[in-house]
Image (tube, rainbow, N blue to C red):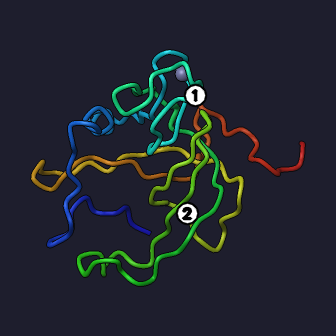
Amino acid sequence: MTAPAPGPPGAPILRRTPADAPFFDAAARGELLIRGCPACAYALPMDAYACPHPEHPPGADGLGWLPASGRGTLVSWSSVHRAPHPAFAGQVPYTIALVELDEGPWLEARLVGADPAGLRAGLRLRAAFVHPADPADGESFPVFAPDHPTPDHPTPLATGDPAP
Ligand SMILES: [Zn+2]
């Protein structure tokens, strides 16, 4: 399995808007940001419009960004066998994961470095970032891969694993 190319020839190019510029600036640094309420630090999904606390200001201007650990758990996944755009024909099949971040919100992202036949709900995942070689090819973006243990981040038990 190969990591997705940031911009295969002819592909739609991922471009920032003023509203999501902080997200892409962080992705370029290899950091994951999620939406959050600046009044209470409540972590929210990427498409959230307001904090669930009614006294906190609603709307895009009322929300901020929070740093996320980049770690989460596989909730579900889908294998894509038919390219959604001709430019991605060389990348199929690939896997789209629904990830529950450790902070709570769910997001969708490409899953890399994993055999789809071996996937199971509860698999621990870690964000990685795809960086285009040329800024003209678009923004850096997160993907997720199995969270293999490293000396500073031993892999915790995945949800559903039996106790040792
Ligand atoms: Zn709030």
Between marks 1 and 2 in the image, the one whose residue lies nearer the viewer: 2
Residue extending furthest toward the front: 54
Q: Is residue 41 visible?
A: no
The image quadrant where one finds the C terminus is top right
Question: Picture quarter containing residue 61?
Answer: top left
Q: Amino acid at mark 1?
A: Asp
Q: Is mark 1 within 8 Å of ligand 1?
A: no
Q: Is residue 36 above or below residue 6?
A: above
Q: Which residue is mark 2?
A: 114
x%, y% of residue 64? 39, 26
- The residue type indicated by label 2 comes to Ala
Q: Residue at x 21, y 66 (%)?
A: 12
Element assignment for label 2? loop
Q: Residues within 10 Å of mark 1 (few under 14, many from 20)?
A: few
Q: Earlier in the sequence, mark 1 or mark 2?
A: 2
What is the x, y in percent for residue 137? Answer: 15, 56
Q: Residue furthest top?
A: 39
Crowd rating for badge 2 (residues with CA inside 10 Å; few <14, some 14–19, many 20+): some
Query: Which one is nearer the viewer's eye here, 155 or 142?
Result: 142
Q: Quadrant of residue 105?
A: top right
Who is closer to the viewer here, 60 or 7?
Answer: 60
Ligand 1's quadrant is top right
Q: Which residue is mark 1?
A: 152
Q: Residue at x 9, y 53 (%)?
A: 136
Residue at (26, 48) in percent of width and height: 131
Position of 14 with respect to 66 (left or right) is left
The part of the image, by quadrant, that contains residue 18 is top left
Q: Can residue 154 be seen here?
A: yes
Above-or-below relation of 76 to 47: below
